[in-house]
Image (cartoon, helix red, strand yellow):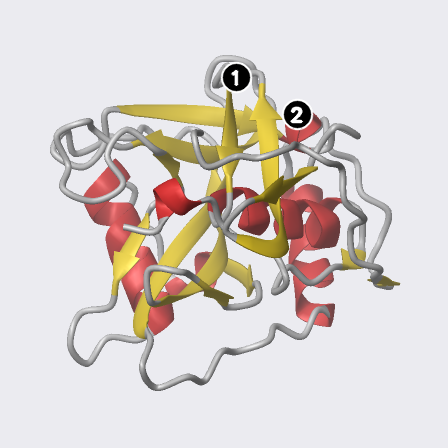
Amino acid sequence: MGDATSFVPLTSQKAHRLKGPRMQIDSFDDILEHKIRARLAEFEPVSVTRPDLRQAAVAIIVMQNPDTGAPSIVLTLRPATMNRHAGQYALPGGRLDAGETQAGAALREVREEVGLSLQEADILGQLDDFETCSGFRITPFVLWGGSGQVLDPDPTEVEAVFFVPFTELNSPDIPQMHAWQTGEKPVPSAYIPTLGHNIFAPTAAMLFQFREIALRGKATRVSDFEQPSFTWS
């Protein structure tokens, strides 16, 4: 956090309303799946086309918390022993293999990192590509993980798995916008009580966009969000 200057609230972007059905975020059922899929079907994701960027994909997995029954998103904590982004909270995901599609990479990474085997039919939709300061184009996919699934995380890639409830994502305190000395763009963060920590962009930006589109029906863009310098390498 040493690169932070002053944490000055900044104005979020305007967004137009989507036409999907009204969302109830406290019940996990087929209706929830249908509503999220409908919202994402109406949203038109923006693709980043810069050829110099390496391609990666991440998964925003919608699952029922096995302990509380709450609709939740799966987040992981990366081990401190990893070479890149050690000790950071992250969505399951990674680089594309040769000849692999973005969707295929997201499904593979979910299987490898948390032991959850999902199919293309489980993809609810896609968010905007996110261009990172470390030279990646990240494509986020929203996946339906369902209920009753048992996760089996790979300890070499995942230190811990967390189920972040929709009610926490829907907090009016998310996001907090900060000024950072590395640039003029706002840096979003989100305090997640389940984690007991703040998370920052890119993960915070993608979760914010998911929240705005899927839970609130607002076609919000996040391309003008910056990332703190500790996420660059």
Position of residue 20 measured from the top left corner of the image (x, y, whole percent):
82, 59
Seen in the picture, residue 190 relative to 232 is either above or below; the reply is above
Disc ID at residue 147: none
Answer left or right for 111 relative to 123: left
Answer left or right for 216 relative to 232: right
Give the residue type that dot 2 points to: Glu
Could you classify mark 1 by the number of other residues whose Cα lies within 10 Å: few (under 14), some (14-19), or many (20 or more)? few
Looking at the picture, tell me which residue is in the foreground, 186 or 35: 186
Give the residue type that dot 1 points to: Thr
Dot 1 falls on a residue whose secondary structure is loop
N-terminal of the two: label 2 or label 1?
2
Residue 63 visible to the viewer:
no
Q: Do the residues labelled 2 and 1 touch (CB within 8 Å)?
A: yes
Looking at the picture, tell me which residue is in the foreground, 227 or 93: 227
Q: Say which residue appears at 36% left-offset and 61% top-offset.
A: 57
Q: Name the residue under label 1.
A: 194
Answer left or right for 185 relative to 99: right
Position of residue 232 measured from the top left corner of the image (x, y, whole percent):
34, 51
